[in-house]
Amino acid sequence: MKKFVFRNGIYTVLRPLYYLCKVFGLAPYSYVADRRNKRATADYGYWNYIFTVIWLTVFTVGFPVQILALKSTDFNRDTLFIAFKIYMISSYTSSIVVVVWVSVIKRRKFLEILENVSEVDNKIRYTHQEETSMNRKMMFNVISQIILLTVIQCSLTTYIIYIMASEPYYIIIIQTMIGVPDFCNALILFKFVTLVSIVKQRYSHLNKRLNNWISGAVSLNKANVRCRQFDRTVDQVNITRVFVSSVGNIEGTLKKTDIHWLRQIYSELYDITCLINDTYGIPVLATTCWMLTVVVFSLYEALINSEMWGISDVLYAITYSIFFFKVTLICHTATNEARSSSILVQKLLLEGNCRNENIEELKMFSLQLQVMTNEYTASGFFSLNLRLCASVVSAIVSYIVIMVQIK
């Protein structure tokens, strides 16, 4: 039993996602929030592994059943049979890897990430308006994406049942179970993307503070320039006056302790990024390969069996193509948000309105940002960014062209 302090309502924001992950065995723990004390009590008891064991058994048993069921299915081409077989293998294999890795091997890491984020929030000291706005945006994104993912999956399942209404019941059940591991894989990616978005929000908020310091330094420079011009016209003597700014200046708000405080927060955010990569690197690698096979098989089947499965296959391919693009886009923008901090620190140094001790601290801050590069990867095999998206698109087109030419 362990207690976590959530200052900014992380529990409330992630509660819908937590319940959905709980049903699919991706959250082998339980935690209940106390709104008065703003605490959440986590429990790792054996009863929390019930859904994990159930779904792991379903995926393990369903994998060979689906492979054996392929022999009784009529395929127009051998390449279509091979493509569908590879798709089934990748789907069930990735779902088993996801459940074992997230719910068994790294079962404590998710709450550890939330605990670290909560500690960062306690140091940032949001205003009430900033906290409310940030939580509302994240809550809207979580709920809307859960609804969208559920509606699409239910619609595809309903369409499959409608197409195969004349088939025996066991075949319909087998066909509808194909979408279950796909939903599990998509859910873990959605969980990963949500954590990346949370870290991105913190970087964005800190970068706004750096921008405010830069704006204060710029206004101070302009005021000093006007002062020097005025002094030249009156006394013909160069006198530099000190103007006190509410944002940061030589003697004002910007101090060495403020910069050191920022360095500590950025260091903790870097540790959170590393923890996210360590927790979800293997699942992201497995689900990325799965999404590639989903799109390739769906587009190829839509070209071959357009009369029967064309609509569902095209919709399936478009859905997971957009989902893959969203994963890479969010990771790309989150990485750029963290990298932009180094540029802002350099701009603050160029203003030249800081004490020597502040300049030294800013230089150390700049060096720290260069060393602590924030990047999201699939267990180190490749970086999650828009370059990866472009490479995957070219690979999908190449595979489709090759498969269409093979008879």
Image (tube, rainbow, N blue to C red):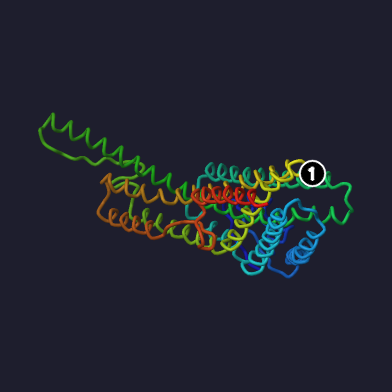
Q: Which residue is drawn at 22% across and 35% down?
A: 225
- Is residue 320 toward the left or the right of residue 265 in the image? right
Frontmost residue, 266 versus 163: 163
Badge 1 local density, few (<14 within 10 Å), some, or many (20+)?
some
Q: Which residue is drawn at 54% across and 41% down?
A: 129
Choose top left, top right, bottom left or bottom right for residue 148. top right
Frontmost residue, 60 versus 309: 309
Q: In the rendering, at what x and y percent does residue 213 appear? A: 36, 44
Residue kind at label 1, given as amino acid type:
Tyr
In this view, the residue farthest toward the left is: 236
Q: In the rendering, at what x and y percent does residue 100 appear? A: 67, 67
Residue pointed to by mark 1:
159
Q: For the N terminus, give its image quadrant.
A: bottom right
Choose top left, top right, bottom left or bottom right for residue 214. top left
In this view, the residue farthest toward the front is: 407
340 above or below 45? Answer: above
The number of callouts visible is: 1
Please tell me whether mark 1 sits on a helix, a strand or a loop. Answer: helix
Q: In the rendering, at what x and y percent does residue 326 appear? A: 57, 46
Frontmost residue, 72 versus 359: 72
- Is residue 362 toward the left or the right of residue 389 in the image? left
Q: In the rendering, at what x and y percent does residue 194 appear? A: 59, 51
